Amino acid sequence: MIVPELGVRGGPAALEFYTAAFGARVEFQVGDESIVAQLAVGDARFWVHDESPPHGIASPRTVGGATTRLLLVVDDPDVVVARAVAAGATLHTPVGDSHGWRLGRIEDPYGHHWEIGCPLGPWPGVSLPAGTA
């Protein structure tokens, strides 16, 4: 299992964004102004950390861009991408069918790039999470 940890500027606002955009649940949180939190979308989990240079945690805004892209597998990518854009994400690629997936790409307000999609048929290692639209 790989669980990403995202460095952000403005942790409290980031938790609000991920909750509104992806329907994320905060499962664990330390701090109110400087945040360390575990979130979940369906069965997928990720951490959000406020920047902390002494701990080597920087946001894409600090390092000049994201170095990874995250793939969020959901039931209905059209709904989730629209919700993310309404919550403040930037649309990079509209949702469409390509290479066996229904997929769109956004950049969240913290500089992280997300592909949001679902396979159009059976896909090795991927099962659709229930209730992630």
Image: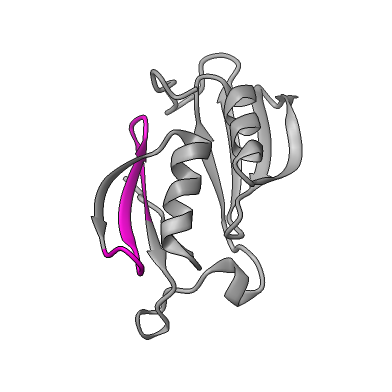
Q: Is 8 in the magenta?
A: no
* Colour basis: one colour
Q: Is residue 93 left or right of residue 12?
A: right
What residue is drawn where x is 65% and y is 67%? 65
Q: Position of residue 7 (x, y in %)?
A: 46, 65
Q: Of all residues shown, which one is farthest toward the bottom?
A: 54
**Residue 11 % position (x, y):** 43, 62
Q: Position of residue 72 (x, y in %)?
A: 51, 37
Q: Specify the quadrant of the image occupied by residue 56.
A: bottom left
Q: Residue at x 40, y 19 (%)?
A: 131
Between 34 and 56, the residue placed more toward the observer is 34
Number of numbered labels in the structure image: 0
Residue 42 vertical position relative to residue 48 in the rendered view, above or below: above
Q: Give the image quarter of residue 94.
A: top right
Q: Residue furthest top?
A: 121
Q: Nearer the viewer, residue 5 or 99?
A: 5
Q: Looking at the figure, which quarter contains the N terminus?
A: top left
58 or 126: which is nearer to us? 58
Residue 43 colored in magenta in the image: yes
Q: Which x, y percent locates residue 110?
A: 57, 59
Closer to us: 10 or 40:
10
Q: Which residues are magenta?
A: 31-47
Residue 104 vs 52, above or below: the answer is: above
Residue under the point 34% across and 64% down: 35
Q: Is residue 32 placed above or below 102 in the rendered structure?
A: below
Q: Residue at x 38, y 18 (%)?
A: 130
